[in-house]
Amino acid sequence: DDRFTVVIVGGGAAGITVAAQLHRRRPNLAIAVVEPSTTHAYQPGWTLVGAGVMSLAQTLRQEGGLIPEGVDWIRDRVVSFEPDANTVTLGSGRKLGYRRLVVCPGLQLDWDKIEGLPETLGRNGVTSNYSRETCAYTWQCIESLEGGTALFTQPPMPIKCAGAPQKIVYLAADHWRKRGTLHRTQVEFSLAGDVLFGVPYFVPALQKQMDYYGAHLHFKENLIRVDGAKREATFQRVGTDETVTRKFDMLHVTPPQSAPDFIKSSPLANAAGWVDVDPATLRHVKYEFIFGLGDVVGTSNAKTAAAARVQAPVVVDNLLASLDGRPIGAQYDGYGACPLTVSYGKVVLAEFLYGGKPAPSFPYDQRKPSRFAWMLKTQGFPRLYWQAMLKGIDVKVPHKAIKAD
Ligand code: FAD
């Protein structure tokens, strides 16, 4: 019973989607999902939890209810890979054999790379939408702030949902604007990089929103230390030894992120630690029986659930072809999406492909803040996630590349 046709490492957005699609297409395949956690999170909802629009409970489901009937759930974690023997080793010491392996354990949040942060996170006005423990605290911080200084941070790329650090800037500022306290609130956004958003096509539209709220942007500033009791955050100016310390009344941190340690130290990793797959076929560049998708792969797309949704059918097609001994032909175009919540009620819906090519799905200028896109973000996408994507229903997106003007 320790051999499966397909073993899937991770039962998050990518893993459940692949398991469900494989099971739909080949009900008799012996499939195992290795996933230690018993609750599954719809992480894109955490931005809305942080803004008081959704409850944390609405973003969580029992993992056991999401594993497709007929697929084995192994409640353990993978600790190492033996690709030459076609096995993985679990925390318990048990080994699982496979004919094909799908690697999708997401990425790792490196909270402890910021001195003082783990001790104060969730208290002293220090919060983060990137953790299920604290995204609800973000809303408490926003609601209780009567003025003063609110700092928001963004670490070096790559991170998952690169737009999330700024989504909460807009929503917080919009809340304070409506309450009439924005004029006495200093909103500061420090980014380790030197651009507001990685896809240039959308930058002017987003900068306009930052200007509207009067937010101060500090580029090339990387958070390195937090003193919760003193309410001070220290940033390093990227590329120098210079530091700058800022006082805050509220601090929203986006933590540094990297490949999970057990991936970094495995033979599957590229030089930067991510799973080394072909950007089009998503098959491992060295091990032909291994596929990867989701946040853990080293491809240059935006690390989003939207990307995982479009990657999953490519992995499933290619994996089945390879099991059948047919050539693998499905190709991923680098699609990723980022619904930027620029106010309560409006979203700039960024959709793009490899190389930062804009690729809208809808027939309007998606740089314009839209109420329709807000409805998608708050109602449409969560439904799409739970009721179609995780059930293995492949909703084809009609996105099409356009020329950036
Ligand atoms: P995950 O969904 O994180 O799942 C990984 C799974 O692997 C987890 O269940 C974990 O327990 C498991 N795992 C870890 N280690 C092991 C191990 N050793 N063995 C076995 N299993 C393991 N995306 C969007 O598309 N749109 C958005 O608006 C958006 N907003 C976001 C806002 C926030 C605040 C955050 C945090 C994320 C957001 N995302 C958004 C990103 C999206 O959530 C991720 O890109 C997506 O969840 C990636 O799917 P995944 O399956 O690769 O990883």
Image: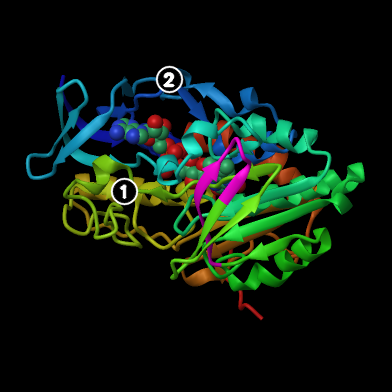
Screen quadrant of the C terminus: bottom right
Q: Nearer the viewer, mark 2 or mark 1?
A: 2
Please give the range of residues in magenta: 220-233
Percent of width and height locating residue 369: 78, 59
The CA span between labels 2 and 1 is 22 Å
State whether residue 280 is above or below residue 260: below
* Kind of element beneath mark 1: strand
- Precedes in sequence: disc 2 or disc 1: 2
Which residue is painted at 62% across and 22% down in the image?
Answer: 57
Q: Are the two marked residues, 2 and 1, in contact with CB atoms closer than 8 angstroms?
A: no
In this view, 315 is above or below 4: below
Q: Which residue is mark 2?
A: 38
Question: Is residue 160 at all visible to an observer of this figure?
Answer: yes
Mark 1 neighbour class, 10 Å CA radius: few under 14, some 14 to 19, many 20 or more: many
Q: Is residue 10 at least partly visible in the picture?
A: no
Q: Is residue 118 above or below residue 331?
A: above
Closer to us: 259 or 287:
259
Left/right of residue 181 with respect to residue 22 in the rendered view: right
Q: Position of residue 232 (x, y in %)?
A: 61, 46
- Amino acid at circle 2: Thr
On the rendered image, what quadrant is the N terminus found in?
Answer: top left
- Spot occupied by residue 105 in the image (x, y as percentages of width and height): 35, 39
Q: Name the residue beneath numbered marker 1.
A: 292
* Residue at the image position 84 percent from the left and 45 percent from the top: 176
- Which residue shows up at 50% across the image and 55% down it? 155
213, 71: nearer the viewer: 213
The secondary structure that dominates the magenta segment is strand
Q: Residue furthest right?
A: 180
Q: Nearer the viewer, residue 342 or 12?
A: 342
Amino acid at the residue labelled 1:
Gly
